[in-house]
Image (spheres, helix red, strand yellow):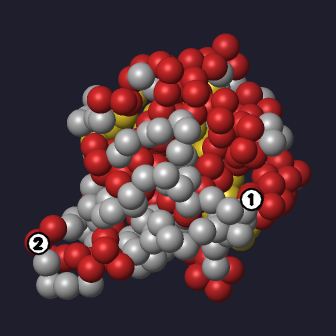
Amino acid sequence: MADTSKRTIVLTGASDGIGAVAARKLAGPDVDLIVVGRSASKLAPIAEATGARSFTADFSRLSEVRELADSIAASVTSIDVLMNNAGGTFDAKDITPDGHEPNFQIDHLAPFLLTNLLRDRLAAADASLVLNTASVGNLFGSVDLDDLDWSKRRTMGMRPYGTAKLMNILFTRGIAQRWTDDKIYSAAVHPGPAATSFGRDSWFVGLAYRTPLKRFATITPEQGAAPLIALAERGADPTVNGVYFDKHKANGRENKQAHDQALIDGLWSRSAELVGL
């Protein structure tokens, strides 16, 4: 069980990229750091370098997300910051074992489930922050509550990924509206186009990351991680509740659906139905 005198931070997507940078920066004697990744071998050096406890889970399998939540809940009494950073951009044709479009499941549905399953640990802190890694790609999104898995619409280009990132913002606002009485606050952040392994699971998006254009169109992983680190260190600040940050700037560019109350409520209820909450 964790030392309750320390600040507990749970960071998903910690095995590489901006997650790995954030893990190294946030680690310290006053932090009980828990890192989560899909690959145990890639996560091991991060855990060793930071002194963090590590857990593995494949977010394309919701059963593993439930097991992850059980493992984390068994190891801590409270969580001060939950950083939902795992995700990426995926080929929409590659349906997950749970039967969902992968951008929808891995980028939204899995962190939605994990966060809800850890709600009591977040509420047990004096105050806590849920930080969701979103993207300026939300501008390309289009949420249709009757077609969350893109079975009725064309899945061209950035649309499925952008829609999942829009969902991250809608989920952030859902938390802000529902859990504030428990002093659970939430913010979303676009870290910038960091030069990482982002896009490796999508030919269309990954193409730009595999060409010389990468040098001109991207920022370093350290630059990308900086706004996540800053918000995690800021912690449970009510003034960030429900706010979407574009890097360090509050109230970044958003899809017109990002403040649609019917979508905030509808996405929450549909997601809860799909994961059996």
Kind of element beneath mark 1: helix
Residue 176 placement: quadrant = top right
Q: Say which residue appears at 80% left-offset and 37% top-offset.
A: 277
- In the rendered structure, which amino acid carries the disc numbered 2? Phe
Q: Position of residue 3 (x, y in %)?
A: 79, 48
Depth check: give the residue in front, 91 or 155: 155
* Residue 58 seen in the current view: yes
Q: Residue at x 30, y 35 (%)?
A: 255
Q: Residues within 10 Å of mark 1 (few under 14, many from 20)?
A: many
- Look at the numbered discs 1 and 2 and tell me whether their residues touch, using CB distance below 8 Å: no
- Which residue matches tag 2? 216
Task: Name the residue type under label 1.
Answer: Leu
Residue 261 image position (x, y, % from top left)? 47, 19
Q: Which residue is nearer to you in this view: 6 or 62?
A: 62
The residue labelled by disc 1 is 62
SS class of the residue under badge 2? helix
Q: Is residue 20 visible?
A: no
**Residue 130, how many percent across, how many down?**
57, 38
* CA distance separating discs 1 and 2: 37 Å
Q: On residue 148, which mark appears?
A: none
State the residue in front, 149 or 140: 149
Instruction: Residue 186: give x, y in percent of width and height.
Output: 52, 31
Q: Which numbered mark, 1 or 2, is in the foreground of this view?
A: 1
57 to the left or right of 217: right
Relative placement, left or right, of 21 versus 222 is: right
